Image (spheres, coloured by chain):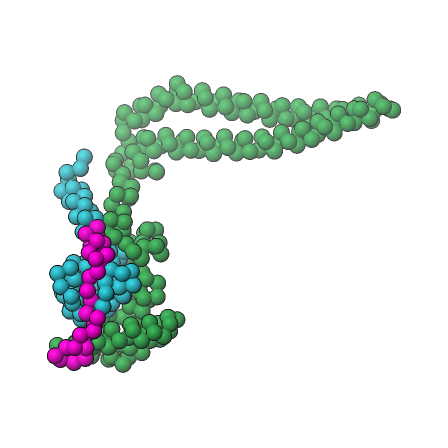
């Protein structure tokens, strides 16, 4: 299985990507991500909290039709910048891995 | 595990945080349970999907999650073994995909399988050793032996001076004794110096031999 730090960094990128298009609430983010990447739902909350503490996300409460109000996460301008940087890092990384696994390197 | 049990474990594990943070964190999970119920899931199902509360709590505490990231239902493989010095670094809290995965670029990639000797490399190493390496090392060790002999010589001289001082009398004896004393000091000094010099030379030789092996074995001994 992949290195834990690696997965954590990728999760940050995924969270920022999901929030780049629209605001979402925790449960929504957790279930979306755990469907595609094999992670425990609970993992997402410490990451959301850290991203918010670092100023990449802001939060607000909004009433929901079913049940209690939901905490929505919204990406900040700083978050968008970080997202761009992470995305570039990620694409570079993927390209290097492709080169190695594809045998393009000497 | 139901919601109450999950929340209880979280609360216990988070007790070192400040109360406002604990309330905030627990509220996130209470909301998650509520949303799960709204989606027709039982508390036990939601708790199972969330994962181990103690491990989630630890992610809040140190900012670095370990096993928590592994889904509880998926086989938890050899995470521990894959943790390298980089991921053990607490500063890794703010990792980006670029700085968290150096294993690929940093890991040593042996270009030649262990044991297989590169013919040309071996020939070059033998040539270098015959022409340069062995003569240089022999001269270095000869010099070392010479220095040791010199140190011994000074020691013998000081002993001789003291003997002479005993045999003589008056001012001559005093002068000889003083000379002897200074030579003893010189002997001690040179022995100390020689011990270090000898050590360095042997360390150097060991490195040189390792470097030679590395050249021949294609980096497997790095």
Q: Chain A is which colour?
A: cyan
Residue found 37% across the figure and 70% down from its top: B17
Was residue B110 drawn as part of the magenta stretch in this picture?
no
- In this picture, is A7 found above or below A102? below
Q: Looking at the figure, which quarter contains the N terminus of chain B? A: bottom left
Q: Looking at the figure, which quarter contains the C terminus of chain B? A: top left
- Is B144 displayed left or right of B52 in the figure? right
Residue B155 picture location, percent across and down: 68, 27
- In this picture, is B28 found above or below B195? below
Would residue B182 be visible to someone looking at this image?
yes
Q: Chain B is which colour?
A: green
Residue B126 picture location, percent across and down: 35, 23
Was residue A76 drawn as part of the magenta stretch in this picture?
yes
**Residue nearest the observer in this picture, B64 or B55:** B64
Residue A5 picture location, percent across and down: 27, 56
Numbered disc total = 0
Give the residue at the far right of this rendering.
B170
The residue range painted magenta reads A60-86
């Amino acid at each position: 299985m992949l290195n834990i730090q690696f997965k954590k960094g990728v999760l940050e990128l995924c969270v920022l990507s999901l929030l780049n298009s629209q605001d979402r609430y925790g449960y929504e983010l957790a279930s979306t991500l755990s469907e595609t990447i094999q992670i425990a739902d609970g993992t997402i909350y410490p990451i959301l909290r850290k991203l918010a503490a670092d100023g990449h996300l802001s939060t607000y409460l909004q009433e929901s039709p079913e049940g209690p109000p939901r905490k929505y996460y919204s990406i900040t301008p700083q978050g968008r910048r970080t997202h761009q940087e992470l995305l570039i890092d990620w694409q570079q990384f993927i390209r290097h891995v492709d080169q190695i696994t594809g045998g393009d390197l000497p | 595990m139901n919601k109450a049990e999950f929340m209880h474990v979280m609360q216990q594990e988070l007790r070192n945080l400040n109360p406002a943070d604990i309330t905030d964190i627990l509220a996130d999970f209470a909301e998650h349970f509520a949303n799960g119920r709204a989606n027709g899931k039982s508390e036990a199902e939601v708790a199972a999907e969330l994962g181990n509360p103690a491990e989630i709590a630890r992610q809040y505490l140190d900012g670095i999650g370990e096993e928590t990231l592994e889904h509880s239902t998926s086989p938890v493989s050899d995470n521990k073994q894959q943790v390298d010095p980089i991921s053990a670094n607490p500063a890794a809290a703010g990792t980006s995909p670029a700085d968290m995965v150096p294993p690929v670029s940093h890991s040593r990639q042996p270009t030649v399988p262990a044991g297989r000797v590169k013919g040309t490399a071996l020939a070059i190493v033998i040539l270098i050793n015959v022409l340069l390496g062995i003569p240089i090392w022999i001269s270095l060790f000869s010099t070392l032996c010479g220095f040791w002999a010199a140190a011994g010589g000074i020691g013998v001289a000081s002993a001789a001076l003291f003997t002479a001082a005993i045999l003589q009398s008056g001012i001559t004896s005093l002068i000889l004794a003083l000379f002897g004393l200074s030579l003893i000091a010189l002997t001690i000094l040179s022995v100390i110096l020689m011990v270090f010099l000898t050590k360095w030379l042997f360390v150097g030789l060991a490195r040189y031999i390792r470097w030679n092996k590395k050249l021949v074995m294609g980096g497997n001994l790095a």
